[in-house]
Amino acid sequence: MTFAYNSIGKGRPRREQPVDRPIPVGPIPVTAIVLTYNEAVNITRCLEAIGAIADVVIVDSFSTDETLRLAETARPDVRVFSHAFEDFGDQRNWALSHCAPRYPWVLFVDADEYCTPAFLEELAAFAAAPGGYAGAFVAGKSYFLGRWVKYSSLYPSYQLRLLRLGQVRYRKEGHGQKEVTDRALCYFTEGWRHEGFSKGVHQWIERQNRYGTEEVGSILELRKEPIGWRELFSHEPVKRRRCLKRIGAKLPLRPLVRFCYVYVLKKGFLDGLPGLLYCLLYLCNDIHLIVKIREQRYRGNCEV
C-alpha cells in the first residue's frame, strides 16, 4: 500500500486516501547519503536503521574518531567519500555530483537520524510509484531526555531530504539549506527519529553557538524582506514556517515571544518536564543569537 500526495502549490500537502499498490519485497531501490564528522556515537545505529535501503554512501568531513571503522563494520558494502565541510547545501550538492548514486532517488540522512520501520515502508511504497514528483519533505521526531518532544519541537518541521537525481539542488540558508527546484514536491506522512542530543547537552550548546554565528547574516537579510502575510495561512507547512521565520526576525522580544508561542500556544507543556527544559534551552539559544546580532552592530560590520 502507498499513498497519493498533493504537490506544492496544488492544495494542502497531506496524505490522501490510500491506493492499493504492492510494497517491493527486498532492498529499497534508493541511495541513502549520510553526512558525517566524528559520529562514532551515532553511526552504527544510523546505518542499522537504514539496512533495508539498497545503496548507502557516507560523505565524511575527515573524522578523527572511529566513525568510518564503525560504519564499515555495521554496513560492509557502504561506499565512503571524503570532502571538507563548508555548509550543508554545498556538502549535499557535492555528494550528488561526485558519489555516483546507483538509483534515481536519493535520501539524505544525518547520522543522528534513525529511520523507523513505518518510514521505510512509506519510502518503499513511494519509490515504487513516485508519480511526477521531484522530491519529498520529511519531518524528524525530536527526542530529548528519552521523550519525543512533539509539541516543543513544533513537529512536523519539514526538510527536503528525498529527491530525484538531477531535479533538485540546494543552496545555503543560515546554517542549513534550502531546496532549489521548479518541480512538484510532496510531503511524507511518516517521520524518522532525531536524536539531536545524542552527544550530550554540552555538545548541542556548542553546535548551536556555531550555528548562531552563521545565522546572523540570514536574520539580517530576513529583516529586509516583506513578511508575506498570506503565506502564514498557507496549507503548505514549509511556507508557514518560513513566514514565521521572517516575522521572528523582526520581533524585538523574539526569545520571549518564541518561548510563549511554543510552550503555551503550541502546547509544549504537554511534553512534561523534558518539554519545558527543551523550550528553555531554545530560549537561551535565542538570547545568545540576539546578543550576537547586537555585537555585530556594535562592531560596525553591518547596518540593522
Image (cartoon, rainbow, N blue to C red):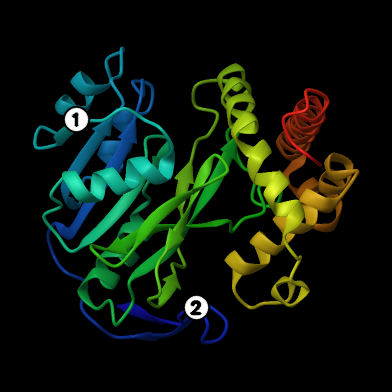
245 relative to 34 in the view: left or right: right
Q: Quadrant of the C terminus?
A: top right
Percent across and percent down for residue 8 are 49, 78
Q: Which amino acid lies under the numbered mark 1 shown in the image of this protein?
A: Ala
Cβ atoms under marks 2 and 1 closer than 8 Å: no
165 relative to 205 in the view: left or right: left
- 177 vs 188, nearest the viewer: 177
Q: Earlier in the sequence, mark 2 or mark 1?
A: 2
Percent across and percent down for residue 283 are 79, 35
| Label at residue 74 | 1
Q: Residue at x 16, y 44 (%)?
A: 99
Residue 79 in view (yes/no):
yes
User: Around disc 2, counting alpha carbons within 10 Å, would you say few (fewer than 14), some (14 to 19), or many (20 or more)?
Assistant: some
Percent across and percent down for residue 107 are 30, 54
Residue 267 in view (yes/no):
no
- Circle 2 residue: 8
Q: Residue at x 16, y 32 (%)?
A: 80
Q: Residue at x 57, y 33 (%)?
A: 146
Q: Residue at x 37, y 43 (%)?
A: 90
Q: Which amino acid lies under the numbered mark 2 shown in the image of this protein?
A: Ile
Could you tell me which secondary element the residue under label 1 belongs to? helix
User: Around disc 1, counting alpha carbons within 10 Å, would you say few (fewer than 14), some (14 to 19), or many (20 or more)?
Assistant: some
| Label at residue 299 | none
Quadrant of the image occupied by residue 303? top right
- 78 vs 44, nearest the viewer: 78
Percent across and percent down for residue 150 are 64, 51
Q: Is residue 132 above or below residue 242?
A: below
